[in-house]
Image (spheres, rainbow, N blue to C red):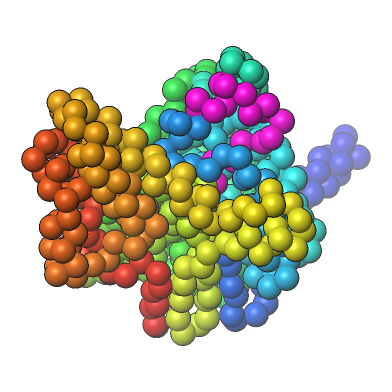
Amino acid sequence: MKKLLSIMGLMILAIILGVIYAEKKDQQSLFGKSAVTFWLISDPHYIDESLTDSGAAFQAIKQTAAGKELDYQKESLQALIAKAQKEKPDMLIITGDLTLNGEKVSAEKLAELLKQLTEQGIKVFVIPGNHDINDGWARKFVGEKQEATAAISTEDFQKIFADSGYKDSSNDPNSLSYAVSVNDTYNFLFLDTNIYPEDDQKLTRPSTGGTIREKTLTWMKNQLAERQAAKKKTLVFMHHNLYKHNELLSNGYVLNNADEVRNILAEYQVPVVFSGHIHAQDIMTETTAEQPITEIISSSFAIAPQSYGVVTLTKQAITYKKQHNDVDKWAQDKNILPEGMNYAKYMQKVLIEDGERLGYAQLASAGLTDPQQLKAGAAFVGKINERFFAGNDFSTDQEVAKLKQENGYQIIAENSPFLKDYVDSIIQDKNEPDNQWQKHF
């Protein structure tokens, strides 16, 4: 009996020591230095080349891809990775919609690409977007057919991206959220804001809207309180948006419980939130309970101008600057893209043509038949669309007035109330310039 009790005592002691070790492991900082830099992208919507033969079915889906470039995604990601390997930021962070429509193969192949960074000591952190988990639209494109392909479950996501945040972090047991201690000054909180079916194995059409569930809110508040008590600043990363960055494009993009989340972030003095989802580059600051909180939305990495953010953290300041991925230079050195191809111009053309299709369809449905007017109106939508998503829409009232004098705008205003409302909503950003931001402490 004494021997049995002794063994049981040792087992209990081992469990206690294991818990203490795990807690200490969670609290250990990634970096011992005071200044760190990370690169930030969102919504790459990666589809692996093995899932398409570039046949008729894939060409058709490209026409409905909302301006996303789908043919050279592996190359563009490899260009970013090669630049990161050369410049050596401390981290790369991706705020959701890693895959086109939740294809498991796409996630696995993306994780293999990202492994090139982790193998060189560059940390990678990801969170899922609304297109990543249990997506019933996961497809393979073969000739003229779309074929269902394996989708990603929540368990799959954690396993596939174990080296991209889900290993050696403090995980929320009720979602795919987790926390990371960066250094003595900063803590990162990665929040899973997606709405999943109650049956975790059920594949559904992806829900556009997002929320932070009650149990995760409790976990989040505990994390924020612990870090505040340790006199650390917490930065938040999520897929859905905290603010209405555009009046027409807010339903389904802003968190369903955004007011509650803003109050919590204000209470714990969170200075900045990084998100994606809307695909448009934008920076916006609002004040809640006398606490200013900035949200920086990264445009989709799958659309022009293929931006990424460079964020530098010091004890005294947070600095953000938008950069552009130079695929052409990398591809020329490697002789990878088709001869004479300008990838940056190609991406821009894909995005503009998507806007032109929207303009043409809306004007035609409104009854406009004149070919020249249709062309002019559609071209104006394409131009304004490209400005908005690239974050180049911070304009003066005089610049906007000049744009509205153009023939294309006049045609839209006279023929399509819907299209006029859309164009008016994206023609001018009055928040703040979207290319850089800085906060001093």
- Judging depth in this view, the residue of 353 and 78 nearest the camera is 353
Percent position of residue 159, x then y: 70, 38
- Please, is residue 92 above or below residue 135 in the view? below
- Direction from residue 411 to residue 273 in the image, left or right: right
- Direction from residue 411 to residue 227 in the image, left or right: right
- Please, is residue 171 above or below residue 263 in the view? above
The residue sitting at the right extreme is 3
| Residue for point 14% across, 67% down | 397
| Residue for point 47% across, 68% down | 322
| Magenta-drawn stretch contains 131 | no
- Please, is residue 209 above or below residue 41 in the view? above
The residue sitting at the left extreme is 414
- Please, is residue 312 above or below residue 45 in the view? below
Quadrant housing residue 394? bottom left
- Judging depth in this view, the residue of 14 and 72 nearest the camera is 72
| Residue for point 51% across, 50% down | 347
| Residue for point 16% across, 30% down | 368
- Judging depth in this view, the residue of 183 and 295 nearest the camera is 295
- Can residue 96 be seen here? no
Quadrant housing residue 48? top right
Percent position of residue 201, x then y: 56, 20
Picture quarter with the N terminus: top right
| Magenta-drawn stretch contains 52 | yes
Quadrant housing residue 361? top left
Percent position of residue 330, x then y: 69, 62
**Which stretch appears magenta?**
40-61
Picture quarter with the C terminus: bottom left
Percent position of residue 362, x then y: 23, 31
- Direction from residue 209 to residue 75 in the image, left or right: right
